[in-house]
Amino acid sequence: MRVVVLGSLMQDLVVRVPRLPLAGESLIGDGFAMFPGGKGGNAAIACARLGASVHMVGRVGTDAFGDRLIATLQADGVDCSFVQRDPTNGTGVAIPIVFDDGGNSILSVPRANMAMTAADAAAARAVIEGADVLLVQFEVAMEATLAAMRMAWRAGVPVLPNAAPIVRYPAEALGLATWLVVNEVEAAAMAPGTESDHAGKAMGLMANGMEAVVITLGAEGAIVASGVGTKVVAPFAVDAVDSVGAGDAFCAAFAFAMATAGLGIGGIAEAARFANAAGALSVTRHGAVPSLPRLEEVQALVALPGAGLRH
C-alpha cells in the first residue's frame, strides 16, 4: 500500500513529572529523554511498520535534530525525498510532559514546520496523486496541508486529516476529507454542544460530506460515525505507561486498514478496532517512535477476545 504523509517533524524532549507545576513553582521531574517525533513523522513510521510504502513530505532545519529525524525515518524505510531542509528555521521541537498515570500534556514549537508552503506539496504531486491514502495533520502551515488535500481529492485519493492540534482552519479542509479522526478535545472545539454527546458530535461533523468520522476516547475506546449511524468501539485493556504518540498510531493504523485489502478487516468499525489495538500497544512503551507497533503485534492483539463493537 502506498501512503503519503504531509505533516510535522519534531524533536521530542520528554519530561516525566508527577503533576504540572503551579504558576511560579519550580518542580523536580522524575526523568528526561529525547525521541524523534512530530505527528507527521510518527504517522509515517507507524504506516511503514504496518507494511506500507511511505513517502514523507515535511520540513526540518539544517541542524542536528533535522539530521536525526531524517535518519530515523529512513531507518524504518520511509522515503524522505520530499523532506526539505530549511536554512532559516530550525527543526521543530515538542516538550511532552508525561505523568505517572501515562497521560500527557504537550508543548509544541513547530519552527520549520510552519514554513512549509504549497510548493512543498506541489513538489510531491506525483506521489500524492499515485497514493492509496494521504494523511495530514494541523501541525504544519495550513497552506501546504490544503494544497496536498486538493491534489489528492482531485485525483480520487482518500484523504485522512487528523485535526490535531486544533487550530483555526478553513471549512474547505473538512470538505476535502474522506475520513476524519479527532480526539474528545478536538471534537468539542469543532462541533460544540453537549460535552458527553460524542455520537452527536461525530454525526454533526459528518455533515461536511465525509464517509466516516472517528472520535478517539483514550481508555474508553472510540466512537465511529458513518452513513449507517454510530458504533462504539470498545478499548483493549493494557497497562499504560506513556500515551505520547498513541493518537498517531491510531490514525496510521486506521488509514492502513481502510486502504488495504486482504487483511480481513471488513469495514469502518473494524478498521477502528484495528486502530484501537495499535493505539493500545503504543501506550505500553515509552516514547512516540519507539512505541509504534508492527503489523504482527497489532494482528495478534486484534485476534485476542476482548474489545468488540457496541451499538
Image: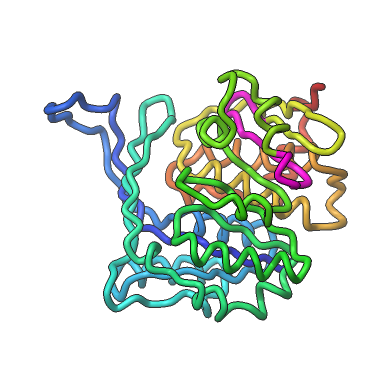
Question: What residue appears at the point 80 percent right and 22 percent down from the top-left corner?
Answer: 310
The region drawn magenta spans 206-222
Q: Is residue 43 left or right of residue 139?
A: right
Please tell me in which quadrant of the rendered image residue 63 appears: bottom left
Please tell me in which quadrant of the rendered image residue 301 appears: top right
- Whether residue 120 is situated above or below residue 5 in the rendered picture: below
Decide which of 207, 255 is in the foreground and name it: 207
Give how far across and how far down residue 173 sits, in percent.
60, 54
Give how far across and how far down residue 57 sits, in percent.
53, 70
- Colouring method of the image: rainbow
**Magenta-drawn stretch contains 213:** yes
Work out which quarter of the rendered image holds the C terminus and state it. top right
**Magenta-drawn stretch contains 134:** no
Decide which of 14, 148 is in the foreground and name it: 148
Question: What residue appears at the point 71 percent right and 68 percent down from the top-left corner?
Answer: 2
Please tell me in which quadrant of the rendered image residue 194 appears: top right
- Whether residue 59 is situated above or below residue 217 in the rendered picture: below
Q: Is residue 294 left or right of residue 138?
A: right
Question: What residue appears at the point 75 percent right and 42 percent down from the top-left corner?
Answer: 212
Decide which of 288, 232 is in the foreground and name it: 232
Q: Is residue 292 left or right of residue 175?
A: left
Question: What residue appears at the point 58 percent right and 47 percent down from the top-left corner?
Answer: 249
- Whether residue 102 is situated above or below residue 181 in the rendered picture: above
Give how far across and how far down residue 195 sits, in percent.
56, 20
Work out which quarter of the rendered image holds the N terminus and state it. bottom right
Tag count in the figure? 0
Q: Is residue 209 left or right of residue 293?
A: right
Give how far across and how far down residue 82 sits, in percent.
52, 77
> Which residue is the extreme one toward the front?
171
